[in-house]
Amino acid sequence: MPSRFVSSFRRACRPVPLYAQRLTLGVSLLAVVGGLTAHPVVAQAADVQQSSPQSAVAIPAPPSASQQRQAARLSTSVVFKPTRTDMALIEDLEHRTFLWFWEAGDAQTGLVPDRYPSDQTQASVASIGFGLTAYGIGAERGYITRQQAIERTLNTLRYLTKLPQNDSAENASGYHGFFYHFLNNKTGLRFNKDIELSSIDTALLMQGILFTESYYTQDTPQEAEIRSLSNQLYQNVDWAWMRRPDMRLSMGWSPEHQFLPNYWEGYSEGMMAYILALGSQKHPLEPASWQAWLTTNDRRWGEYYGQTMLNFAPLFGHQYTHSWIDFRGIQDDWNREKGIDYFENSRRATYAQRTYAMTNPGKWQDYGKDVWGLTASDGPGELTQTVGGTPRHFMSYSARGTGRDYTQDDGTIAPTAAGGSVAFAPEIAIPALREMKHRYGNHIYSRYGFVDAFNPSFHTADKSFWSDTAYLGIDQGPILLMIENWRSGLVWNTMKRNPAIRQGLLKAGFRGGWLGNEAEVSAPASQHANAQHSAQSGQQQSG
């Protein structure tokens, strides 16, 4: 069974490194590397040439005591007061990023491509989930009218509802309520036989679907239909079918190979799948599955570049679930024991990445306090160059990151790393976005905001650095949603009203903050359907 690495590299028309070929499918390109399987694999540091899958792994040097003290000072909570220039950038970036979803998406079917502009022919169900949320943001911001958002959302939900769900290899879009992570953009069917039925891509889709259920709450026939279709699609997902005997969720299934051997365990974007599954009325998981997901937390808890946190090397693992769910002040049993919440954990991960760039152990060009950010993204390509007398191995699409779990870094910066962290730490994320736009100008900032990635260390005869020409839905999404969460809390506040999200969190043991301290679950989704919409606004401050 080919990996998500394989399918990702195929979509970029680039070769796949040998060490990637045994990893599993899913949005988390290195979820297995991050410790989610019983037999974890450690990723090769990108600046070390690998001769075989068994080659020795380069372990980055730990930060010095002075570096750790510096990081601790930098991460002290501050109230961030953006300048007019900051807000002009943020407003422009949010609008441009929204425009990507609006123009890339098919107005009749609602299918959203994996990347755009591109000649590829696959739609991404994860991109659709971000897109469904984007339309509500666009209506609130006045980029489109509410009626335009309603029509695009209805077209999307109607189309998804009609797609065939069965166990055939070629004539299905999904099975047991799950969707294949890539669909043919003309037919809506499974893109090809290499594509798995994905638990995490379905979860990203369902996050967007539940957003529509809780956002469109006016008493009109169209908005009532949105709520009905949303609830139907969500309740049809058979989470219990995807559950392994050990209570963990499998990463996926295919007709050819049945369930994948890899599963979701440990802090990552996989947490959203468990919360959604726990909140289901029709096919729920039990709290024991959340406890199984937590099993590796203690092994992944530790200090890295001055921050004590649950480690997950690429920043997307800290952003995806948080794009929809506000974890500030709510804690499960594990959180309470450590005196932290998952929002604070991801804020620390953002600071650790910045301190890593400031320390720059790989000596990559231009890294510093305002040029940083490693996550899954495009890259220059699979090749080795000699830079300053040193051989440097560069990568194509890869899950770059840095943490105690692994470091994979070839000098490629992904703006979504900072953009998707604006809600966590605006005081460092916004200056980074500002500096990267200022320094590289038109090379990396265009009609849809920041291109997916760039690399100042990669040189050619006619260019001083490499920059991408494409935009990826799963990287555009966190930029848009987290900027809006920082500005108004719109997505977070909308999802707080969703009974499935509330029930999932309560069943996982979360208490406190906006959840309160009651153990009972919330009202059924049918009672929620008539709730009144009340968009909340107000500048969010870092804390």
Image (tube, rainbow, N blue to C red):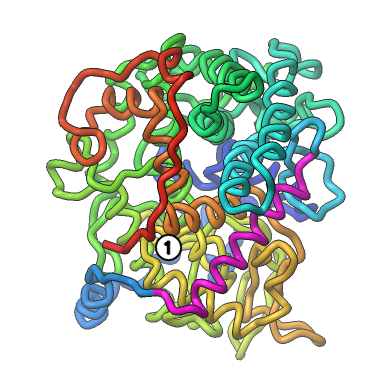
Residue, x 46% and y 77% (percent of image)?
431
Q: How many marks?
A: 1
Residue, x 19% and y 33% (percent of image)?
516
Camera sees residue 2: no
Rendered location of residue 374, percent (x, y): 50, 64
480 inside magenta stretch: no
Q: Is residue 97 above or below residue 26?
A: below
Q: Is residue 349 above or below residue 391?
A: above
Q: Is residue 485 left or right of residue 333?
A: right
Furthest residue to the bottom?
Answer: 388
Identify the residue position indicated by label 1 in the image: 402
Q: Is residue 494 above or below residue 485?
A: above
Give the class, few, some or many, for how many residues have Cα within 10 Å of label 1's Cα (few <14, many ≥20).
many
- Asked which quadrant contains residue 425, the reply is bottom left
- Asked which quadrant contains residue 528, the reply is top left
Rendered location of residue 8, percent (x, y): 68, 47
Is the C terminus in the top left, top right, bottom left or bottom right quadrant?
A: bottom left
Q: Is residue 364 above or below residue 219?
A: below
